């Protein structure tokens, strides 16, 4: 079952905080693979503490997708 953007956004906090169940995670991941806008919302939900956990999970390297989005946001805000 595919989720709508509204459904994904409603579950986003639980997903980012690793509180969503397996079924929800699968639905959200599937939706975000097809929807760049929701994928970007996920990155915006990442607080500095959450971002640090992501970096640690990637052996201290900031994932390329996160670097690109940070750069794009920085350019928009400058």
Image (spheres, rainbow, N blue to C red):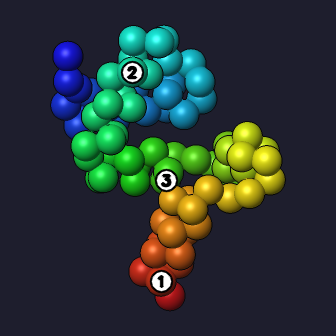
Q: Name the spot of residue 36 as percent of width and height, x first.
A: 30, 52
- Is residue 22 or residue 48 the one in the foreground? 22
Q: Say whether disc 1 or disc 2 marks the residue closer to the N-terminus.
A: 2
Residue in the picture at 28% in, 34% down: 31
**Disc 3: which residue:** 44
Q: Is residue 42 left or right of residue 70?
A: left
Task: Tell me the residue at 38%/47% (across/down).
Answer: 39
Residues at circles 3 and 1 in contact by the CB criterion of under 8 Å: no
The tag on residue 26 is 2
**x and y, in percent, of residue 44 in the image:** 49, 53
The image position of residue 12, as x and y in percent, is 43, 33
Question: Is the N terminus in the top left, top right, bottom left or bottom right quadrant?
Answer: top left
Q: Can residue 53 be seen from the camera position used here?
A: no
- Residue 75's tag is 1
Give how far apart the Cα atoms at labels 2 and 3 are: 20 Å
Element class at badge 1: helix
Position of 74 compared to 38: left or right? right
Identify whether 25 is placed above or below 67.
above
């Amino acid at each position: 079952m595919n989720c709508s953007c509204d459904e994904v956004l409603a579950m986003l906090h639980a997903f980012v905080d690793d509180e969503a169940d397996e079924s929800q995670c699968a639905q959200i991941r599937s939706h975000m693979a097809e929807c760049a806008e929701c994928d970007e919302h996920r990155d915006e939900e990442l607080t500095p503490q959450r971002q640090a956990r992501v970096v640690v999970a990637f052996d201290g390297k900031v994932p390329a997708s996160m670097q690109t989005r940070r750069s794009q946001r920085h350019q928009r805000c400058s």
